[in-house]
Amino acid sequence: MAEEIRLPEEEKLPDIDITDEEFAEYINSLNDLTLLEASSLKRSVDETIRQWKLCKESLNSLSVADDADKKLSNSIAEANIFESMGVDTRDEFNTEYEKNIGRLEEIAAKLLAIIEEHKDEVDSTTYMTQQMITILKRRLGSFVKPNSEPFYDREKKTGELILKTFEYRLTGSKEIIDYLGQKIVPWLRSHRKEVSKSLREETKLLLEGCKTRAIKDLCRQFSENTIAKFMYHLRESLDDCAELVIIFTNFLAHMLKHGKNNGTDSYGKILVLDFTDMYNGIYDIPDWSIQEYLDLFYEKITETLTEEVEDRYPSKNWHVISDDCDCGLTRPMENPHDWELLEDTD
Protein backbone atom coordinates (compact mmCIF):
# COMPACT_ATOMS: atom_id res chain seq x y z
CA MET A 1 0.00 0.00 0.00
CA ALA A 2 1.21 3.50 -0.71
CA GLU A 3 2.81 4.75 2.49
CA GLU A 4 2.55 7.88 4.57
CA ILE A 5 -0.12 9.64 2.53
CA ARG A 6 -2.22 11.56 4.99
CA LEU A 7 -5.14 13.90 4.64
CA PRO A 8 -4.48 17.61 5.14
CA GLU A 9 -6.52 17.20 8.30
CA GLU A 10 -8.17 14.24 10.02
CA GLU A 11 -11.71 13.55 8.88
CA LYS A 12 -13.94 14.28 11.88
CA LEU A 13 -17.07 12.47 13.00
CA PRO A 14 -20.17 14.68 12.60
CA ASP A 15 -22.97 15.05 15.13
CA ILE A 16 -25.01 11.84 15.10
CA ASP A 17 -27.70 13.05 17.51
CA ILE A 18 -30.17 13.27 14.63
CA THR A 19 -33.41 11.64 13.52
CA ASP A 20 -33.45 8.16 12.02
CA GLU A 21 -34.29 9.66 8.62
CA GLU A 22 -31.38 12.09 8.82
CA PHE A 23 -29.07 9.31 9.93
CA ALA A 24 -30.10 7.17 6.96
CA GLU A 25 -29.29 10.10 4.66
CA TYR A 26 -25.92 10.49 6.35
CA ILE A 27 -25.08 6.80 5.88
CA ASN A 28 -25.96 7.11 2.20
CA SER A 29 -23.77 10.23 1.86
CA LEU A 30 -20.71 8.21 2.89
CA ASN A 31 -20.71 6.72 -0.61
CA ASP A 32 -19.30 10.04 -1.85
CA LEU A 33 -16.15 9.73 0.26
CA THR A 34 -12.81 8.92 -1.30
CA LEU A 35 -10.92 5.93 0.07
CA LEU A 36 -8.61 8.22 2.05
CA GLU A 37 -11.53 10.12 3.56
CA ALA A 38 -13.26 6.86 4.47
CA SER A 39 -10.08 5.53 6.09
CA SER A 40 -9.57 8.76 8.02
CA LEU A 41 -13.18 8.87 9.21
CA LYS A 42 -13.06 5.23 10.25
CA ARG A 43 -10.08 5.95 12.49
CA SER A 44 -12.14 8.68 14.17
CA VAL A 45 -15.19 6.42 14.52
CA ASP A 46 -13.15 3.53 15.91
CA GLU A 47 -11.55 5.84 18.47
CA THR A 48 -14.97 7.17 19.55
CA ILE A 49 -16.32 3.63 19.93
CA ARG A 50 -13.26 2.75 21.99
CA GLN A 51 -13.83 5.73 24.29
CA TRP A 52 -17.48 4.83 24.89
CA LYS A 53 -16.62 1.21 25.67
CA LEU A 54 -13.74 2.15 27.98
CA CYS A 55 -16.03 4.50 29.89
CA LYS A 56 -18.67 1.80 30.22
CA GLU A 57 -16.07 -0.68 31.49
CA SER A 58 -14.79 1.90 33.96
CA LEU A 59 -18.29 2.57 35.30
CA ASN A 60 -18.99 -1.15 35.64
CA SER A 61 -15.72 -1.65 37.49
CA LEU A 62 -16.62 0.83 40.23
CA SER A 63 -17.41 -1.48 43.12
CA VAL A 64 -20.13 -0.85 45.69
CA ALA A 65 -18.72 1.46 48.32
CA ASP A 66 -18.97 0.57 52.02
CA ASP A 67 -17.20 3.60 53.45
CA ALA A 68 -17.29 7.36 52.92
CA ASP A 69 -13.86 7.58 51.31
CA LYS A 70 -14.71 4.94 48.73
CA LYS A 71 -18.05 6.56 48.00
CA LEU A 72 -16.34 9.90 47.44
CA SER A 73 -13.72 8.30 45.20
CA ASN A 74 -16.42 6.56 43.12
CA SER A 75 -18.42 9.77 42.88
CA ILE A 76 -15.42 11.70 41.56
CA ALA A 77 -14.59 8.94 39.07
CA GLU A 78 -18.18 8.84 37.82
CA ALA A 79 -18.33 12.62 37.47
CA ASN A 80 -15.13 12.62 35.40
CA ILE A 81 -16.50 9.92 33.09
CA PHE A 82 -19.85 11.69 32.69
CA GLU A 83 -18.13 15.00 31.93
CA SER A 84 -15.89 13.39 29.29
CA MET A 85 -18.93 11.96 27.49
CA GLY A 86 -21.24 14.96 27.92
CA VAL A 87 -23.83 13.36 30.22
CA ASP A 88 -24.95 13.99 33.82
CA THR A 89 -26.14 10.65 35.20
CA ARG A 90 -25.55 6.93 34.81
CA ASP A 91 -29.03 6.47 33.33
CA GLU A 92 -28.30 9.16 30.76
CA PHE A 93 -24.96 7.54 30.00
CA ASN A 94 -26.59 4.14 29.44
CA THR A 95 -29.23 5.64 27.15
CA GLU A 96 -26.64 7.57 25.11
CA TYR A 97 -24.35 4.56 25.04
CA GLU A 98 -26.92 2.28 23.44
CA LYS A 99 -27.94 4.90 20.89
CA ASN A 100 -24.43 6.02 20.00
CA ILE A 101 -22.71 2.63 19.90
CA GLY A 102 -25.37 1.27 17.57
CA ARG A 103 -25.03 4.18 15.14
CA LEU A 104 -21.24 4.33 15.41
CA GLU A 105 -20.90 0.65 14.64
CA GLU A 106 -23.22 1.04 11.65
CA ILE A 107 -21.02 3.89 10.37
CA ALA A 108 -17.86 1.83 10.96
CA ALA A 109 -19.34 -1.11 9.04
CA LYS A 110 -20.29 1.14 6.11
CA LEU A 111 -16.81 2.68 6.02
CA LEU A 112 -15.17 -0.73 6.19
CA ALA A 113 -17.25 -1.84 3.20
CA ILE A 114 -16.04 1.22 1.25
CA ILE A 115 -12.43 0.47 2.18
CA GLU A 116 -12.79 -3.21 1.27
CA GLU A 117 -14.31 -2.28 -2.09
CA HIS A 118 -11.13 -0.39 -3.02
CA LYS A 119 -8.54 -2.56 -1.28
CA ASP A 120 -7.14 -3.83 -4.59
CA GLU A 121 -6.55 -0.28 -5.84
CA VAL A 122 -4.50 1.13 -2.96
CA ASP A 123 -1.22 -0.38 -4.17
CA SER A 124 -0.91 2.26 -6.84
CA THR A 125 0.85 5.61 -6.83
CA THR A 126 -1.56 6.89 -9.47
CA TYR A 127 -4.71 5.88 -7.59
CA MET A 128 -3.61 7.26 -4.21
CA THR A 129 -2.45 10.51 -5.80
CA GLN A 130 -5.79 10.92 -7.59
CA GLN A 131 -7.49 10.40 -4.24
CA MET A 132 -5.47 13.21 -2.68
CA ILE A 133 -6.20 15.52 -5.60
CA THR A 134 -9.94 14.89 -5.26
CA ILE A 135 -9.80 15.71 -1.55
CA LEU A 136 -7.69 18.83 -1.98
CA LYS A 137 -9.92 20.18 -4.75
CA ARG A 138 -13.00 19.54 -2.64
CA ARG A 139 -11.56 21.37 0.33
CA LEU A 140 -10.26 24.27 -1.71
CA GLY A 141 -13.68 24.57 -3.32
CA SER A 142 -15.31 24.83 0.11
CA PHE A 143 -13.06 27.70 1.24
CA VAL A 144 -15.16 30.68 2.29
CA LYS A 145 -13.38 33.89 3.20
CA PRO A 146 -14.54 35.07 6.63
CA ASN A 147 -14.55 38.79 7.30
CA SER A 148 -12.25 38.49 10.29
CA GLU A 149 -9.76 35.88 9.04
CA PRO A 150 -6.42 37.55 8.24
CA PHE A 151 -4.73 34.33 7.16
CA TYR A 152 -7.30 33.21 4.60
CA ASP A 153 -5.30 34.25 1.51
CA ARG A 154 -2.14 32.58 2.79
CA GLU A 155 -3.92 29.35 3.67
CA LYS A 156 -5.68 29.25 0.31
CA LYS A 157 -2.40 29.85 -1.52
CA THR A 158 -0.75 27.09 0.52
CA GLY A 159 -3.56 24.67 -0.32
CA GLU A 160 -3.29 25.53 -4.01
CA LEU A 161 0.46 24.85 -3.96
CA ILE A 162 -0.02 21.48 -2.28
CA LEU A 163 -2.66 20.59 -4.89
CA LYS A 164 -0.26 21.60 -7.66
CA THR A 165 2.52 19.35 -6.32
CA PHE A 166 0.19 16.34 -6.31
CA GLU A 167 -0.83 17.17 -9.86
CA TYR A 168 2.87 17.30 -10.75
CA ARG A 169 3.21 13.83 -9.25
CA LEU A 170 0.70 12.43 -11.74
CA THR A 171 2.98 13.42 -14.62
CA GLY A 172 6.19 12.05 -13.10
CA SER A 173 7.22 14.68 -10.54
CA LYS A 174 9.45 16.39 -13.12
CA GLU A 175 8.64 19.87 -11.78
CA ILE A 176 9.29 18.64 -8.25
CA ILE A 177 12.74 17.32 -9.11
CA ASP A 178 13.51 20.52 -11.00
CA TYR A 179 12.39 22.61 -8.01
CA LEU A 180 14.61 20.64 -5.62
CA GLY A 181 17.54 20.97 -8.01
CA GLN A 182 17.08 24.74 -8.18
CA LYS A 183 16.80 25.16 -4.41
CA ILE A 184 19.59 22.93 -3.11
CA VAL A 185 22.59 24.99 -4.27
CA PRO A 186 21.35 28.32 -2.80
CA TRP A 187 20.53 26.43 0.41
CA LEU A 188 23.97 24.83 0.49
CA ARG A 189 25.66 28.22 0.07
CA SER A 190 23.57 29.90 2.75
CA HIS A 191 24.05 27.00 5.20
CA ARG A 192 27.72 26.29 4.50
CA LYS A 193 28.77 26.42 8.18
CA GLU A 194 25.99 24.05 9.23
CA VAL A 195 26.83 21.70 6.35
CA SER A 196 30.55 21.74 7.10
CA LYS A 197 29.83 20.89 10.74
CA SER A 198 27.58 17.99 9.70
CA LEU A 199 30.26 16.62 7.36
CA ARG A 200 32.92 16.84 10.08
CA GLU A 201 30.82 15.30 12.81
CA GLU A 202 28.54 12.85 11.05
CA THR A 203 30.32 11.24 8.10
CA LYS A 204 31.97 8.65 10.30
CA LEU A 205 28.74 8.06 12.22
CA LEU A 206 26.84 7.44 9.00
CA LEU A 207 29.46 5.02 7.70
CA GLU A 208 29.33 3.13 11.01
CA GLY A 209 25.56 2.68 10.73
CA CYS A 210 24.32 5.47 13.01
CA LYS A 211 21.53 7.92 12.29
CA THR A 212 22.55 11.48 11.48
CA ARG A 213 20.57 14.40 12.89
CA ALA A 214 18.86 14.89 9.53
CA ILE A 215 17.82 11.24 9.27
CA LYS A 216 16.41 11.44 12.80
CA ASP A 217 14.44 14.51 11.72
CA LEU A 218 13.08 12.65 8.68
CA CYS A 219 12.00 9.76 10.91
CA ARG A 220 9.89 12.23 12.91
CA GLN A 221 8.06 13.18 9.72
CA PHE A 222 7.68 9.61 8.41
CA SER A 223 7.95 6.15 9.90
CA GLU A 224 11.47 4.75 10.18
CA ASN A 225 10.53 1.94 7.83
CA THR A 226 9.47 4.48 5.18
CA ILE A 227 12.73 6.40 5.51
CA ALA A 228 14.69 3.13 5.26
CA LYS A 229 12.95 2.41 1.95
CA PHE A 230 13.38 6.01 0.79
CA MET A 231 17.10 5.82 1.53
CA TYR A 232 17.49 2.79 -0.74
CA HIS A 233 16.89 4.80 -3.92
CA LEU A 234 18.34 8.02 -2.49
CA ARG A 235 21.68 6.36 -1.78
CA GLU A 236 21.65 4.74 -5.19
CA SER A 237 20.88 8.07 -6.86
CA LEU A 238 23.66 9.84 -4.94
CA ASP A 239 26.24 7.16 -5.84
CA ASP A 240 26.31 5.96 -2.22
CA CYS A 241 28.46 8.98 -1.41
CA ALA A 242 28.25 9.64 2.33
CA GLU A 243 28.90 13.35 1.94
CA LEU A 244 26.17 13.82 -0.68
CA VAL A 245 23.71 11.80 1.41
CA ILE A 246 24.43 13.96 4.46
CA ILE A 247 24.02 17.18 2.49
CA PHE A 248 20.83 16.13 0.72
CA THR A 249 19.13 14.73 3.85
CA ASN A 250 19.99 17.95 5.70
CA PHE A 251 18.45 19.94 2.86
CA LEU A 252 15.35 17.74 2.82
CA ALA A 253 14.89 17.91 6.60
CA HIS A 254 15.22 21.70 6.42
CA MET A 255 12.60 21.89 3.66
CA LEU A 256 10.12 19.71 5.55
CA LYS A 257 10.54 21.77 8.71
CA HIS A 258 10.47 25.26 7.25
CA GLY A 259 8.11 24.68 4.33
CA LYS A 260 5.02 23.87 6.40
CA ASN A 261 3.69 27.41 6.50
CA ASN A 262 3.67 27.89 2.73
CA GLY A 263 3.21 24.33 1.46
CA THR A 264 6.68 23.94 -0.09
CA ASP A 265 7.31 20.99 2.24
CA SER A 266 5.05 19.03 -0.14
CA TYR A 267 7.89 18.96 -2.71
CA GLY A 268 10.06 17.06 -0.27
CA LYS A 269 7.25 14.82 0.96
CA ILE A 270 6.35 13.71 -2.55
CA LEU A 271 9.98 12.80 -3.27
CA VAL A 272 9.94 10.56 -0.19
CA LEU A 273 6.62 9.03 -1.28
CA ASP A 274 7.88 8.46 -4.84
CA PHE A 275 11.06 6.68 -3.76
CA THR A 276 9.12 4.62 -1.22
CA ASP A 277 6.53 3.57 -3.80
CA MET A 278 9.36 2.60 -6.16
CA TYR A 279 10.81 0.40 -3.44
CA ASN A 280 7.40 -1.17 -2.80
CA GLY A 281 6.93 -1.86 -6.51
CA ILE A 282 3.74 0.19 -6.85
CA TYR A 283 5.05 3.25 -8.72
CA ASP A 284 2.83 3.25 -11.82
CA ILE A 285 2.71 6.79 -13.23
CA PRO A 286 1.63 6.49 -16.89
CA ASP A 287 4.16 7.17 -19.65
CA TRP A 288 7.01 7.62 -17.16
CA SER A 289 9.32 4.84 -16.02
CA ILE A 290 11.20 4.59 -12.77
CA GLN A 291 14.47 4.66 -14.69
CA GLU A 292 13.47 7.92 -16.37
CA TYR A 293 12.63 9.35 -12.96
CA LEU A 294 15.97 8.32 -11.45
CA ASP A 295 17.88 9.58 -14.49
CA LEU A 296 16.22 12.99 -14.14
CA PHE A 297 17.00 13.08 -10.42
CA TYR A 298 20.63 12.27 -11.17
CA GLU A 299 20.86 15.00 -13.80
CA LYS A 300 19.06 17.74 -11.87
CA ILE A 301 20.27 17.00 -8.36
CA THR A 302 23.19 14.59 -8.14
CA GLU A 303 25.27 16.19 -10.90
CA THR A 304 24.42 19.72 -9.74
CA LEU A 305 25.21 18.94 -6.12
CA THR A 306 28.41 17.05 -6.98
CA GLU A 307 29.74 19.95 -9.05
CA GLU A 308 28.99 22.46 -6.30
CA VAL A 309 30.54 20.32 -3.56
CA GLU A 310 33.66 19.53 -5.57
CA ASP A 311 34.19 23.24 -6.22
CA ARG A 312 33.77 23.96 -2.52
CA TYR A 313 35.87 21.05 -1.24
CA PRO A 314 38.32 20.30 -4.09
CA SER A 315 40.69 18.18 -2.00
CA LYS A 316 38.02 16.25 -0.17
CA ASN A 317 38.33 12.48 -0.04
CA TRP A 318 34.82 11.19 -0.63
CA HIS A 319 33.52 8.21 1.37
CA VAL A 320 31.37 5.44 -0.09
CA ILE A 321 28.63 3.90 2.04
CA SER A 322 29.02 0.13 2.01
CA ASP A 323 26.19 -2.15 0.90
CA ASP A 324 25.83 -3.66 4.37
CA CYS A 325 25.45 -0.26 6.09
CA ASP A 326 21.88 0.58 7.11
CA CYS A 327 22.58 4.20 8.16
CA GLY A 328 21.09 3.43 11.55
CA LEU A 329 17.69 2.57 10.09
CA THR A 330 15.54 -0.52 10.22
CA ARG A 331 16.83 -2.49 7.28
CA PRO A 332 14.13 -2.95 4.63
CA MET A 333 13.83 -6.06 2.50
CA GLU A 334 17.06 -7.39 1.04
CA ASN A 335 15.56 -7.57 -2.45
CA PRO A 336 13.13 -4.76 -3.24
CA HIS A 337 10.71 -5.15 -6.10
CA ASP A 338 12.56 -5.27 -9.40
CA TRP A 339 11.58 -1.86 -10.74
CA GLU A 340 13.05 -2.71 -14.15
CA LEU A 341 9.97 -4.85 -14.71
CA LEU A 342 7.87 -1.68 -14.56
CA GLU A 343 9.90 0.30 -17.07
CA ASP A 344 8.27 -0.89 -20.25
CA THR A 345 4.57 -1.69 -20.26
CA ASP A 346 4.22 -1.55 -24.05
Image: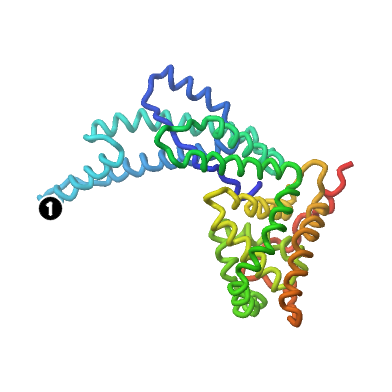
> Which residue sits furthest left?
68
What is the number of callouts on the image? 1
Circle 1 residues within 10 Å: few <14, some 14–19, many ≥20: few
Tag 1 residue:
69
What residue sits 57% from the left and 61% below the top? 219
Q: Is residue 150 left or right of residue 285?
A: left
Residue 296, x across and y down, in percent: 80, 55
Task: Give the camera-side residue of 306 and 295.
Answer: 306
Query: Relative to 230, does residue 146 appear above or below in the rendering?
Result: above
220 over 108 or under it: above or below: below
Q: Residue 329 sits in which quadrant?
A: bottom right
Residue 270 drawn at (x, y percent) = 66, 50
Q: How is the image coloured?
A: rainbow
- Which residue of the protein is positioned furthest toward the top in this rendering? 21
Q: Position of residue 178 (x, y in %)?
A: 73, 53
For residue 73, say whether it is visible.
Answer: yes
Under tag 1, what secondary structure? helix
Task: Using the rendered view, name the quadrant where residue 147 is placed.
Answer: top left
What residue is drawn where x is 59% and y is 67%?
214
Q: Nearer the viewer, residue 184 or 339?
A: 184
Going by the numbered disc 1, the residue's amino acid type is Asp
Is 339 on the left or on the right of 276, as rendered? right
